[in-house]
Image (spheres, rainbow, N blue to C red):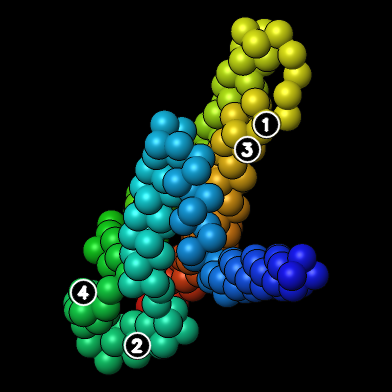
Amino acid sequence: MKKISFTLAAAGMFVMGTTTASAAMLQEEAEASKGFTQVLKEQFIQGGPDFMGIVLLCLILGLAVAIERIIYLNLATTNSTKLKQQVEDALASGGVEAAKEVCRNTKGPVASIYYQGLDRVDEGIESAEKAVVAYGGVQMGQLEKNVSWLSLFIAIAPMLGFMGTVIGMIQAFQKIAAVGNLSASLIAGDIQVALLTTVFGLITAIILQIFYNYIIAKIDSIVNDMEDSSIALIDMLAAHKK
């Protein structure tokens, strides 16, 4: 009888152990099956609303500025070679007014610079050149509008993350001082939160930096196009005046 009871108890322990192991395996599989977005969301919530909220605000505002600039710059991009040929043909066939009409019907800073130069051509080539240079500076300012805000968000996002880390470490050491002994379980939560703020601050800065570099490269491309087109316009006006 005792042997049967011992056997039943052993079998029960074996079943319980098997069930526990199966549950642990199922939990591990569930953790592994979580997507990157879900894990990121959980880690963000664990980081706390204080600094995480500010970092998230930097990311949202930075993305809003980046998207607005990308849309504006794409709309400002013009086929300058085609526009140059159209203006040159209009000058040859219909004169300055026909060329100005072509510029009025074309969007972008290059067409605007062409229009300003054509509008001052009656005052002389030097006046037209000064108008082109001055208006080119205005157009460059329009292209770079709000880009400084994007660089600001790139700078302060990791700073806020580091600040959250420092504050979390201070809280952890305050707990150690209050309790009087060093326990990993006592300060693990504070250290985890502290490190999460740094991670998300760096992620925000990396994302915005990619957009920033693309925007700067796009602006440089348009500015170079404007400079080349300005030189071509002055050459066209000089040839037309002869």
Position of residue 126 measured from the top left corner of the image (x, y, whole percent): 41, 54
- Residue marked by disc 4: 104
In this view, 220 is above or below 46? below
- Identify the disc placed on residue 159: none
Of the 4 image quadrants, the one containing the N terminus is bottom right
Looking at the rendered structure, the kind of residue marked 1 is Ser
> Residue placed at 29% from the left, 61% from the top?
116
CA separation in Å, label 2 and label 3: 63 Å
- Residue marked by disc 1: 185
- Residue marked by disc 2: 86
Q: Is residue 119 left or right of residue 225?
A: left
Badge 2 element: helix
The answer to whether residue 200 is visible is yes
CA separation in Å, label 4 and label 2: 12 Å
Write down the quadrant of residue 106 in the picture: bottom left
Between label 3 and label 1, give the one nearer the viewer.
1
Badge 4 element: helix
In this view, 99 is above or below 42? below
> Residue placed at 38% from the left, 43% from the top?
57
CA separation in Å, label 4 and label 3: 59 Å
Judging depth in this view, the residue of 17 and 50 nearest the camera is 17
Tag 2 near tag 3, CB within 8 Å: no
Judging depth in this view, the residue of 83 and 9 nearest the camera is 9
Write down the quadrant of residue 233 in the picture: bottom left
> Residue placed at 67% from the left, 31% from the top?
185
Looking at the rendered structure, the kind of residue marked 4 is Arg
- Residue marked by disc 3: 192
Q: Local crowd at mark 1 within 10 Å, few (<14), some, or many (≥20)?
A: few
Looking at the rendered structure, the kind of residue marked 3 is Gln
